[in-house]
Every structure is written in structure tokens, then in C-alpha cells.
Image: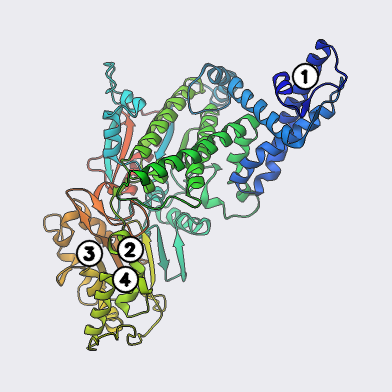
């Protein structure tokens, strides 16, 4: 405070006529003490009152609220009142909080002596309490960390490149000659290779009837989106009913930063409770209160947030200057969304997990979304994504240090919900989005730019041919009217879904052909589309592909995959399972896939995508302690991962595990 008073002309600790050095020092000490006391007493109350506003806005208000507390501290100084303009008070408070963060051991994703000393202080009392309640030695707890979007092969390559030294040490591959403490195994996702389906299956044991990240639910007559709170509530309720139990974390568990609760009693930043009113809705944001109640944490996160925004702007500019391909737009709000995922969400979730470990909870499941967010726009193997992997590895090292001070031993299980597949977007490659292609195939109006593309022109010509209408020179602007409501076209990575909302059941191929005779042929023959799945009145499930290929789903097998062969092992079983979902779309569309390069064409604006079949998006990982029984091989589907984790938890609680 003395240094800042000397540097800032609008910040004074003494009257204009001056005073002794001793008096000045006492004034500074009392002012700093009053500021610290107000921060400790008033700040948590302010944060709890402000939980009704978005967390990002709360973080940005940190500076102004801290400045207000400093002005109050100067005003109540019993020795001499200081003076500061409001803007200067903001600067002084921010610097003082940042210094407190650096010297006081506030949570940071790194290891330092100050934080270690703080852990000792926090853990001693909690260790005694947990052991007293347990009445003797406690069984090991579990920390289940989900690295969102990190594929098995990406993690394996990161270990080889030295990006993840903590994981390398756990696998015994760090060069020090130590024995491995963990094993790394792949697991194969369902056709819907995305967080909603995977995490629902992992936490609740059932992801039945979740065909994609977003789909049109004909029963509810609405679009369901996995990361929409109202949809997440419905999905979690259905999953618990199907599985017959509340979830993986029902016994003394904590859920942090997830879409679903897993049945945990302790929840923070969980989407499925964010839509609920009153107390439960408030609990969904309690993780922000626990973190931002310390103003030093808040200031540090805001500064890191700003640095991450600048990092994204620099990396985006470099990608444009180097003319990298493929590339998608990274402007607008994306730099701020990226900073929220890689800084705010990470810091708050890690802080909550550390608190759970120090409280001795039996099982904690947390989702870290940083890699997935960056890889969507930078590519799953780009330099930007590699930097995020390096920082996530430091998170593992930090939590490993926390375990040294926790009141019970912890086993770390790290897993992913899916991987990501690279590739140019469908729109970039063919000049029009999937929605316009579907509309053109239905004979519906499309934007002029889409009509001028080769795909759009071919689709409109196919409609005329199917309706036996001549293609007249210059007369392509007016197509015959079509019957029925317009289709709902949705995308989940490289998985597309077409539904006709005016029909209450899943339409058959015969019904679709009667309404839009050129649509299925237009889609199946498009070079950017690999295959379609539709229902047939004659054959049941039917797989359509280019050149008139139409194969009954019942005739396909692992030995005879037919059009699904490029998508690798398990594709046939995944498609058959989805065909049995009541809410499968009228037309399920999977993009083209190159098995040699692993590339796909996302129907969203993402150069690293997931959601369908093809490439590394369907190859997730499970990193588990060697002390636990190995998972089954091959491990297929999120529900199978749930069964493995549940068995480990139950054996540990029963004292059967080593």
C-alpha cells in the first residue's frame, strides 16, 4: 500500500501537509488490515448476493467491488483517513489482491510452497474429523476426472511428446525407471460420440434414446439439447428410471462441472439442477461462491481470463497469417467463451475437487472442458490444443499433491467421454450447410448462394427429375410446391438428423419418398455423406449409400459391414442400437469419412468434431490404477464404462479392493 501511494498521484495515505514516517506506516498498516478484514467479512456476503448474475459478470465486477471495499477501509482508518479517486481505488485493490494471491497461497494450477503450507493447515482439522466419524482406518476414495474430448491416441501421442509428464510418470514412461501406477486403455463410444450421451451413460448407467447432442423429440414436440438445463433434467430422470438406481455418485459423492449429477448429494456447476427453482437451483452455482468468496482467487482468475483472451486473439491471427487449412472463424464471442472454459471453469472445478478431497468424500466426478473447446476451433492435434493438454496435466499434478494432505487415500481415474476427428467442414467443402441441402432435396426455397453451388443445383435437378418435370433453361427459380411442414434439420458434429415435426411417428422410407421423392437419393449420393439410416416398412432398419445402395440393417454384421466398413469395428452394432431408439430421427445422416486420414466433414462449423462415426472421435480412453481390476476388453459403450466404475467403487467401499 505504501508503494502504491508513492506511485499513484490520486492515492494518498496522509494529509497534504504531511506527517512522520511512523505515522504514515501505521496508517498504511491499519488501512491494509481494514481492507483485509472487510474482504474476509463482507466479500463472501457480496458474492452470495451476486450469485444471481452470470459467473463471468461476477468475475468482472471483482475489481469494482474490491475498490469499494478499499475506499471504506480508508474512510474508517482511526489514525488518518486516506484519499483515493474511485478509479485509483480499483487499481490499488486489484494490485493488493493480486499480491495476496501470490503470497497467500490462493489456488493456482501449479505447485508452490505457499499452497502446500495452506493445504497442511486446511487438512489437519478435516483429517481428524473424517477419521473420528469413520471410527478407524478409512477406505480409499476415488477422484474421477473427465478430460473432455481427449482421444486415446491424442493422449498417447502427448505422452510420447513430453506434453503430459504426470501421465507419463503414472504409466512408467517418464524415463526415471519407476514402475507404472496406472494403465491406459481405449474404450469405444456409441454412435452418438458426444458428452451428453457419454456422460449420461457413465454417471447414470443408461443413455438409451439419446440419438445425438440435439434432436427433435416427437413425443415432447420440442428440440432436445444435451447442454440445455431443461433437457438435462429430463434426460437424467429418464436415465435413472432406466438404470434403476440414482447414479454412480449416490454414496457420499460429489459432482462438479458436469451436465448430470450422477446422484451425488454434493453438486456444484451441474447443468441438470441449474433449471430447478429455489434451493437446488441456487446449489448449482454454489461452486462459484466457494471460489470467488476469496477475492484473491477472483482477481487471479480475472487476470488469467484476460491473458487467455489475448492468447486466443494471437493464435487466431497467426492461423490466418499462416493460411492454415482447414480453418473456421474464431471471432465474435468465441475468445471469451474459450477463456471461460479454459480458465474460469477449470479454476472453479479444480478448487471444488480439492475441497472435496480435503473433506474426505468417497467419490468425486469432475469434467474439465478446456481441451474440447479449443480443439473444436484449432484442431485436435494443433499447437493450441497441445498447450491446453500441458495445462491439464499440471491440474493432475496439483490434485495429486492435494491427495497427500487429504484425510483418506485417493485413487485417480482419468477418462474421456469421446475424442475428436479432424476435417474440413461440410459447408466449407461444398459451399452450403446440410440444412440447405435438405431443403433443396425437398424442393423448398434455399438462399441464392446455395442454389448456385454444385450440390444445390444437383439437388434441385433431382427434385425435378423425380417429379417428372422438365428442366427448363432459366426456369430453375420456381419448383413445384411440396406437401407437409418443413423438416427440422439438426447437426451434432458429423452426425445430421432430419425430422418431420408434423408426423407423430418415425417416418418410413416409403413415406418420405411419397412426400419428397428426391430427398433420400440426393442425400445418399452426395459426396460429403457416407450413409443414411432410415426405417423401412419392408426391411425394418435400412442403410442407404451412394449409387443406389440400400442394405437392410439386419443383413449387416461385423464380418459383413457393407457401407459401414470405412467406419471400423463396432459401427454396425452402434447403428443397430440407435435404430432401436424411439426418438431416432426420420433420417439419420453420417458424414463421409476417410479411414486413411481419419477425416470427417462436420455439419457444424468445427474443424475438430465429434458426435457421429468416423475416426478418433469414437476412441476415448480410461486411465486407471493398476491396483484395480483391469476393465473388460474391448470396452464398448458408455454404459459399459459405468459398470466398470461402479464395480470399483463398490469393491472399495466393501473393503475388497487392495
Location of the N terminus by quadrant is: top right
**In the rendered image, the vertical position of residue 286 relative to residue 353, given as above or below:** below
Cα–Cα span, label 3 and label 1: 72 Å
Who is closer to the viewer here, 370 or 322?
A: 322
**In the rendered image, the vertical position of residue 117 relative to residue 206, given as above or below:** above
Who is closer to the viewer here, 90 or 372?
A: 90
Between disc 2 and disc 4, whose residue precedes? 4
The reply to whether callout 3 and callout 4 are in contact (CB within 8 Å) is no
Between disc 3 and disc 1, whose residue precedes? 1
Dot 4 corresponds to which residue?
437
Between disc 2 and disc 1, whose residue precedes? 1
Q: Position of residue 534 (x, y in %)?
A: 26, 70
Dot 3 corresponds to which residue?
531
Q: Residue at x 24, y 77 (%)?
A: 537
Q: Residues within 10 Å of mark 1 (few under 14, many from 20)?
A: many
Dot 2 corresponds to which residue?
496
Cα–Cα span, label 2 and label 1: 64 Å
Choose mark 3 or mark 1, whichever is in front.
1
Who is closer to the viewer here, 128 or 150?
A: 150
Location of the C terminus by quadrant is: top left
Cα–Cα span, label 2 and label 3: 11 Å
Question: Exactly how many numbered labels are in the figure?
Answer: 4
Using the rendered image of the protein, determine whether residue 549 is visible from the camera's viewpoint.
yes
For numbered disc 4, what is the local secondary structure?
helix
Q: Position of residue 296 (x, y in %)?
A: 63, 29
The reply to whether callout 3 and callout 1 are in contact (CB within 8 Å) is no
Between disc 1 and disc 4, whose residue precedes? 1
Apparent side of residue 46 relative to residue 152 in the rendered image (left or right): right
Amino acid at each position: 500500500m505504501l508503494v502504491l501511494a508513492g506511485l499513484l498521484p490520486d492515492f494518498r495515505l496522509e494529509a497534504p501537509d504531511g506527517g512522520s514516517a511512523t505515522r504514515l506506516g501505521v496508517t498504511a498498516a491499519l488501512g491494509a488490515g481494514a481492507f483485509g478484514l472487510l474482504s474476509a467479512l463482507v466479500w463472501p456476503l457480496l458474492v452470495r448476493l451476486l450469485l444471481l448474475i452470470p459467473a463471468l459478470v461476477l468475475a468482472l465486477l471483482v475489481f469494482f467491488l474490491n475498490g469499494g471495499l478499499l475506499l471504506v477501509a480508508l474512510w474508517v482508518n482511526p489514525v488518518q483517513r486516506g484519499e483515493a479517486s474511485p478509479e485509483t481505488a480499483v487499481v490499488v485493490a486489484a494490485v493488493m489482491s493480486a499480491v495476496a494471491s501470490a503470497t497467500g497461497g490462493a489456488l493456482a494450477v501449479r505447485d508452490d510452497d505457499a499452497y502446500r503450507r495452506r493445504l497442511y493447515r486446511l487438512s489437519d482439522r478435516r483429517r481428524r474429523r473424517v477419521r473420528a466419524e469413520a471410527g478407524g482406518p478409512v477406505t480409499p476414495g476415488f477422484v474421477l476426472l473427465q478430460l473432455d474430448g481427449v482421444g486415446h491416441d491424442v493422449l498417447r501421442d502427448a505422452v510420447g511428446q513430453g506434453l503430459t509428464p504426470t501421465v507419463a510418470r503414472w504409466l512408467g514412461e517418464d524415463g526415471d525407471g519407476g514402475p507404472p501406477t496406472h494403465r491406459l486403455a481405449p474404450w469405444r463410444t456409441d454412435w452418438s460420440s458426444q458428452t451428453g450421451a457419454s456422460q449420461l451413460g457413465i454417471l447414470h448407467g443408461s443413455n438409451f434414446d439419446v440419438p445425438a447432442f440435439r434432436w427433435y423429440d416427437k413425443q415432447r414436440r420440442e428440440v432436445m439439447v444435451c447442454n440445455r438445463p431443461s433437457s438435462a433434467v429430463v434426460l437424467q430422470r429418464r436415465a435413472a428410471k432406466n438404470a434403476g438406481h440414482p447414479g454412480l455418485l449416490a454414496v457420499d459423492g460429489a459432482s462438479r462441472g458436469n451436465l448430470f449429477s450422477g446422484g451425488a448429494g454434493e453438486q456444484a456447476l451441474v447443468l441438470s439442477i441449474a433449471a430447478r427453482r429455489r434451493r437446488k437451483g441456487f446449489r448449482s452455482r454454489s461452486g462459484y461462491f466457494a471460489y470467488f468468496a476469496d477475492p484473491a482467487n477472483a482477481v487471479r482468475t480475472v487476470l488469467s481470463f484476460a491473458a487467455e483472451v489475448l492468447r486466443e486473439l494471437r493464435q487466431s491471427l497467426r492461423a490466418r497469417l499462416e493460411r492454415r487449412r482447414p480453418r473456421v472463424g474464431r471471432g465474435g464471442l468465441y475468445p471469451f467463451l474459450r477463456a471461460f472454459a479454459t480458465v474460469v471453469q477449470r479454476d472453479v472445478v479444480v478448487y471444488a475437487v480439492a475441497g472435496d478431497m480435503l473433506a474426505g468424500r468417497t467419490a468425486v466426478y469432475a469434467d474439465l472442458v478446456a481441451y474440447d473447446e479449443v480443439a473444436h476451433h484449432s484442431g485436435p492435434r494443433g499447437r493450441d490444443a497441445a498447450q491446453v493438454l500441458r495445462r491439464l496435466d499440471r491440474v493432475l499434478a496439483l490434485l495429486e499433491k492435494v491427495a497427500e494432505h487429504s484425510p483418506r487415500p485417493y485413487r485417480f481415474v482419468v477418462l474421456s467421454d469421446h475424442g475428436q476427428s479432424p476435417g474440413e467442414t461440410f459447408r466449407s467443402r461444398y459451399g452450403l450447410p446440410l440444412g440447405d441441402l435438405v431443403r433443396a432435396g425437398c424442393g423448398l426455397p434455399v438462399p441464392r448462394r446455395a442454389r448456385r453451388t454444385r450440390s444445390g443445383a444437383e439437388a434441385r435437378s433431382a427434385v425435378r427429375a423425380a417429379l417428372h418435370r422438365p428442366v427448363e433453361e432459366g426456369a430453375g427459380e420456381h419448383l413445384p410446391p411440396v406437401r407437409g411442414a418443413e423438416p427440422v434439420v439438426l447437426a451434432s458434429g458429423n452426425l445430421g438428423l432430419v425430422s418431420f415435426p408434423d408426423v407423430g411417428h418415425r417416418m418410413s422410407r416409403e413415406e418420405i419418398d411419397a412426400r419428397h421423392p428426391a430427398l433420400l437419393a440426393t442425400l445418399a449420393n452426395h459426396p460429403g455423406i457416407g450413409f443414411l439410416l432410415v426405417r423401412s416398412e419392408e426391411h425394418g432398419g435400412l442403410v442407404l449409400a451412394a449409387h443406389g445402395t440400400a442394405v437392410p440393417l439386419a443383413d449387416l454384421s461385423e464380418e459383413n459391414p457393407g457401407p459401414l466398413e470405412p467406419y471400423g469395428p463396432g459401427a454396425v452394432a452402434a447403428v443397430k442400437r440407435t435404430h432401436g431408439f424411439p426418438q431416432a430421427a426420420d433420417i439419420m445422416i453420417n458424414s463421409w469419412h476417410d479411414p486413411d486420414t481419419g477425416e470427417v466433414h462436420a455439419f457444424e462449423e468445427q474443424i475438430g468434431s465429434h458426435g457421429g462415426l468416423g475416426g478418433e472421435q469414437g476412441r476415448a480412453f480410461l486411465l486407471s490404477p493398476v491396483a484395480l481390476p483391469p476393465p473388460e476388453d474391448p470396452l464398448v459403450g458408455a454404459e459399459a464404462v459405468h459398470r466398470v466404475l461402479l464395480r470399483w467403487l463398490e469393491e472399495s467401499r466393501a473393503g475388497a479392493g487392495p
